[in-house]
Image (cartoon, rainbow, N blue to C red):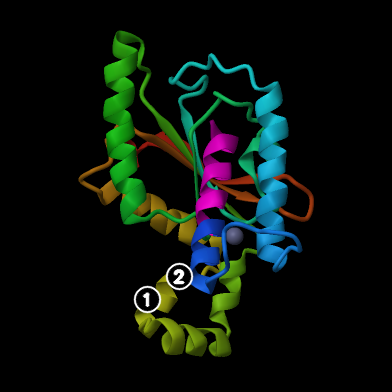
Amino acid sequence: MAKRFFFATVLVLVSVVCAASGAALEVKGEVLDKRMSDLQTLLKRNQQFASEYEGGLNILPKFFTLVLSCVDARIDPAHFLGLELGDALVFRNAGGRVTDDLELDLGVLWMLGAGMAGENFPGLSLAVVQHTDCGLERLAKPEMAAALTKRMGLKQAQIDGLVNTDHAQRIREDIERLRKSALVPKGLIVSGHIYRVEDGTIEEVVAPAPLERM
Ligand SMILES: [Zn+2]
């Protein structure tokens, strides 16, 4: 499920980028640019995937631990946690940060899980995984902040909220945000981790505990 979701997200992002650039979606003859070439490569990989796909997976995941991590191409949880299709729900965004959408999703998924699993529903856990050498560390550069303000109209306070140079601190802030959220069930067990892109290891920075006991 994680790989399929991520692949779908990649396709949407690629489509948005192509639409924004005005590039034709239908490529005839010579490939127009690298982005279109990339899309064709990915779609070919999907054909290979689909040719071997057996289906029949349960909508309920094998693990009731959800994972939040960054979109960084080096840190796919399917790889570093050994997830197979049907194993776990994975959220990915820039930085692996808690957002309004994530709070809403956690509340909805808890209700869905409880509704579908019935008395077998054990509740959910969330592993927040940020990582070393995250791209959001680079937002601390003055020239990057200036570009965000100029191109996107972001205010300095918004940029400060995105900058992520202290992952342990950001993780603690994000978990505190979850704890205060009216949308997120207090029984959600949350933990915080930093994945090291240098050696593939994971360091625990917040031990797992239900939000109501944090
Ligand atoms: Zn990152």
Reply above or below: 124 against 7. above
Q: Quadrant of residue 165?
A: bottom right
Is 115 magenta? The answer is: no
Residue type, label 2? Leu
Image quarter of the N terminus: top right
Q: Quadrant of residue 81?
A: top right
* Residue at the outermost front position: 29
Reply above or below: 105 against 38. above
Q: CA gap, disc 2 to disc 1?
A: 7 Å
Q: How many marks?
A: 2
Reply above or below: 23 against 61. below
Q: Are the residues flagged by discs 2 and 1 in contact, CB closer than 8 Å? A: yes
Which class describes the residues within 10 Å of circle 2: few (<14), some (14-19), or many (20+)? some
Residue 212 visible within the image: no
Q: Is residue 120 left or right of residue 194?
A: left
First to last magenta residue range: 1-13
Instruction: Please report the residue visible at 73 percent of the width from the left and 54 percent of the height from the top.
Output: 197
Could you say where residue 125 lies in the image, as x and y percent from the top left? 43, 32
Q: Which residue is mark 2?
A: 162
Label 1's element?
Answer: helix
Instruction: Please report the residue visible at 49 percent of the width from the left and 90 percent of the height from the top.
Output: 146
Could you say where residue 106 lies in the image, as x and y percent from the top left? 34, 39
Reply above or below: 1 against 205. above
Q: Which residue is mark 1?
A: 158
Image quarter of the C terminus: top left
Observer-nearest of 21 and 24: 24
Residue type, label 1? Gln
Instruction: Please report the residue visible at 44 percent of the width from the left and 90 percent of the height from the top.
Output: 150
Label 2's element?
Answer: helix
* Residue at the outermost top position: 119
Instruction: Please report the residue visible at 41 percent of the width from the left and 35 percent of the height from the top.
Output: 209
